[in-house]
Every structure is written in structure tokens, then in C-alpha cells.
Image (spheres, grey):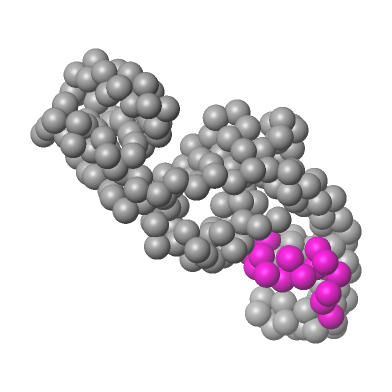
Amino acid sequence: MTTTTELTEQYLEEHPSIKDCLKHGIINYSKLSRKIAKELNIEKKTSLEAILIACRRYEAKLKNEKILENKILDILKRSELEIKNKIVVAIIDKKSYMGNLIEIEKKIQKTADVFNAIEGTKVFTVIISEKYLEDLQTLFDKNMIKISKNLAMITIKSPKDLENTPGVNAYIFSMFSEHGINIVEQMSCWTDTIIVISENDIATVMKFLKF
């Protein structure tokens, strides 16, 4: 049988906005306990007391998360942001000749332009500058499953302690979600976090990625 404490913790986990208020110590525990009791249909006096105690204990657990959040923000404040527009994402069937992918990679690398490739189980995802789209289409022709244009690539270049600090990427992605920004593609390369979005969202992203 699930205890009142377990029910309370589950409720708090499922309500990130309340969890965030607990983390920052800006919540009325009595009102919160009554709200939880009502929504869980356990409004007995003993249940209210148990919920109140569970909320306070849960808040104590969140102190460690707050410390971690400060570490994450410190890393992001020391990170550099690079944005490139006119980006294209192409999905290519793996059945096609991959020597062609190496060919266009060599061509793009000579100009030090954007080239990123992710190998999946059935396809390759290729991220390039719009200027090379025609070359890509010529090489792969009917093996191109999907092409997405008018995109921008954001690269967050972080210090080395990124790799030893859990939750940095989760923190970044949560900000995109909170602002209603869809991430078209994302990848990482050691201390670089690469995110592809619509060009229309650049202005919004620039606002919330200022640390």
C-alpha cells in the first residue's frame, strides 16, 4: 500500500512548478498540504499532518538540487554562444552509398563550414549550411527522406567541468521547453552542446540563454 509520504512525493515530482517553489523556499506549506490532500482525496487531519511533514522533508532534499543548480549556472555563465543561420537538416537513408557523404564532408571541411552527421539505426541525419544543399541532393537524389530548411544552429561552448557536472544539458533543454521552442535536432561533442531550431526562434532563444 502506498503511504501518504510516497503519494506526496509523487505529487510534487509531477508538479515541477511547485517543486521549483519548494526549492527556493517561497511556498506556504499549510496551503500546499490542503491542496495536495484535496486533489488526492485524503483530507483527514492525520493525512494533512503527514503531507505537511512530507513536504518539509522533500524541501530538505531539494537543497542538494539547489546547490547543483548553482554549479550548472556557473558553467553556463562561463560558456560561449555561437549562432549560425541558413542551416539545413537532411535525413538520408542508410542504404545509399556512404562514400558520397565522405565526399561532401571533405568539400565542406575545406571551407571550414558547418558539417555534422549523426548515424541512426536506419538513417543518417546531416546538418549543413544551406549553400551545400544542392550538392547533397545531387549526391543522394532519391535516398533523401526529409529536408528541413530555414533553421539555425546554436552551439554552446562550455568549460571542461561540464563533463563532471550532471544535469547541465537537462537544464538547457528545459528552458527551451518552458519557452515553447521546438528543438529540431540536438547533439553534443565533448564540451560543445549543439542545438538546431527554427530561424524564427532565434530572438527568443537569445533572451533566455543570457546568463
Closer to the camera, 88 or 121?
88
Q: Residue at x 16, y 26 (%)?
A: 139
Question: Which residue occupies 39% across, 57% down?
Answer: 199
45 in the magenta segment: no
Does 23 appear above or below 172?
Answer: below
105 relative position to 24: left or right? left
In percent of width and height, residue 37 lies at: 73, 79
Residue at image point 24% right, 25% down = 94
Give percent across and percent down for residue 101: 27, 22
- Picture coordinates of residue 124, whole percent (x, y): 31, 30
In the orientation shown, which residue stands out farthest toward the top?
99
Q: Is residue 89 visible?
A: no
Give the residues drawn in magenta, as a range.
13-28
Q: Is residue 181 left or right of residue 102?
A: right
The residue nearer to you, when weighing 47 against 205, is 205
**Number of numbered markers:** 0
Residue 25, compared with residue 141, is above or below; it is below
Query: Residue 63 location in percent, x, y?
Result: 86, 55
Asked whether, in this view, residue 41 is left or right of residue 176, the answer is right
Residue closest to the eye, 61 or 40 = 61
